[in-house]
Image: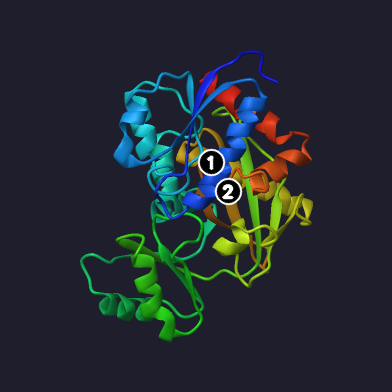
């Protein structure tokens, strides 16, 4: 493990819809850092208490936040201005990954398959106008979700056009821009990526078997909500493709240190990218640590690797 002791602040909690998960991620990271011999300060982050960040005197910040104000580049920008190093992706990569429509444009330009999608501005239009527009553009099944929210919050799978208005309503509670995309059926897989920029490696592919018919918030985060199969039981050729595309997606957005890239493997055997998570869940039962275990990294070793990669930047 690390040979030096650092003073590390862990930011967790936050004010996004993913606060509960972040509390659990934070706890995991804090315990691991302490076991690794670091001096840890834990901060339940709130944008109304920025003085806690402005007065930080630490060697490194470990961001255990998810969703808005944590994963979207805002806190990264603040830390950059304060010249405090932090674990993970910088401002641009974080903001791009959080903006699903923008990141999809980049992926498809480089030959990574994405679902056909379109964005709609809620603020300038009323919900029924948007619903009418969606009816013209899409045929069920399709997905309505906020353009910038993690963890499938505010997501609706529209199987019948009667659900459109409610779906728009739901998604627009989280964001002024909603994203509508064709529903892609198939197997859900995710690929963790780790390494310094230009030398990233993909960890074993994980297949997620949701207990509900869709991998929703509950099945992501409730114990027993979904089953993880690591490594995923898929042909070697597909495994290679997923790992290559995951590293490429991570690099195209300019991510740093680690990320987790979600895909659907369709019944026609195509790998369709869903999104890149720049701050994936790090609770001890999360996907990333599960995959790291397969290559022999304990949770503590994994956390220490992130620290080492960040300090060497």
Question: Which numbered disc covers residue 266?
Answer: none
Q: Residue at x 41, y 22 (%)?
A: 84
Residue 5 at what x, y percent from top left? 59, 15
- Please say which color scheme the image uses: rainbow
Which residue is at the far top?
4
Pointer 1: what residue? Answer: 250
Q: Residue at x 70, y 60 (%)?
A: 224
Q: Residue 92 vs residue 292: left or right?
A: left
Residue 121 at what x, y percent from top left? 28, 64
Q: CA distance from mark 2 to mark 1?
A: 8 Å
Q: Are marks 2 and 1 in contact (CB under 8 Å)?
A: yes
Q: Earlier in the sequence, mark 2 or mark 1?
A: 1
Q: Is residue 223 visible?
A: yes
Q: Is residue 59 above or below residue 87?
A: above
Residue 250 at what x, y percent from top left? 53, 41
Query: Split into 4 quadrants, where in the image is the N terminus?
Result: top right
Along the line of sight, the residue nearer the viewer: 297 or 113: 297
Residue 233 at what x, y percent from top left? 79, 56
Q: Is residue 271 visible?
A: no
Q: Mark 1 packing: few (<14 Cα in 10 Å), some, or many (20+)?
A: many
Q: Mark 2 packing: few (<14 Cα in 10 Å), some, or many (20+)?
A: many
Question: Which numbered disc covers residue 261?
Answer: 2
Q: Residue 81 vs residue 258: left or right?
A: left
């Amino acid at each position: 493990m690390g040979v030096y002791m650092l003073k590390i602040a862990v930011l967790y909690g936050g004010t996004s819809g993913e606060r509960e998960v972040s509390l659990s991620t934070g706890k995991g990271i804090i315990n691991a850092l302490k076991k690794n011999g670091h001096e840890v300060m834990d901060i339940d982050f709130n944008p109304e208490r920025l003085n806690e960040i402005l007065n930080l005197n630490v060697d490194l910040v470990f961001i255990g936040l998810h969703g808005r104000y944590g994963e979207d580049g805002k806190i990264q920008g603040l830390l950059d201005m304060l010249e405090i190093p932090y674990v993970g992706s910088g401002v641009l990569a974080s903001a791009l990954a959080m903006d699903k429509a923008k990141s999809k444009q980049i992926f498809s330009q480089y030959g990574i398959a994405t679902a056909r999608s379109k964005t709609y501005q809620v603020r300038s239009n009323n919900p029924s106008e948007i619903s009418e527009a969606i009816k013209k553009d899409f045929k069920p099944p399709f997905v309505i979700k906020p353009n910038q929210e993690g963890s499938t919050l505010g997501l609706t799978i529209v199987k019948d056009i009667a659900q459109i208005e409610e779906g728009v309503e739901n998604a627009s509670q989280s964001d002024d821009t909603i994203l509508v995309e064709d529903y892609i059926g198939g197997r859900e897989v995710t690929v963790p990526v780790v390494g310094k920029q230009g030398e990233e490696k993909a960890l074993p592919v994980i297949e997620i078997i949701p207990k509900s018919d869709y991998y929703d918030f509950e099945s992501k985060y409730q114990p027993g909500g979904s089953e993880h199969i690591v490594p995923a039981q898929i042909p070697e050729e597909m495994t290679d493709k997923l790992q290559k595309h995951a590293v490429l997606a991570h690099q195209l957005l300019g991510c740093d240190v680690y990320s987790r890239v979600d895909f659907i493997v369709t019944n026609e055997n195509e790998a369709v990218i869903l999104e890149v998570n720049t701050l994936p869940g790090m609770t001890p039962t999360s996907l990333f640590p599960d995959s790291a275990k397969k290559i022999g990294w304990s949770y503590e070793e994994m956390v220490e690797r992130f620290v080492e990669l960040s300090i060497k930047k």
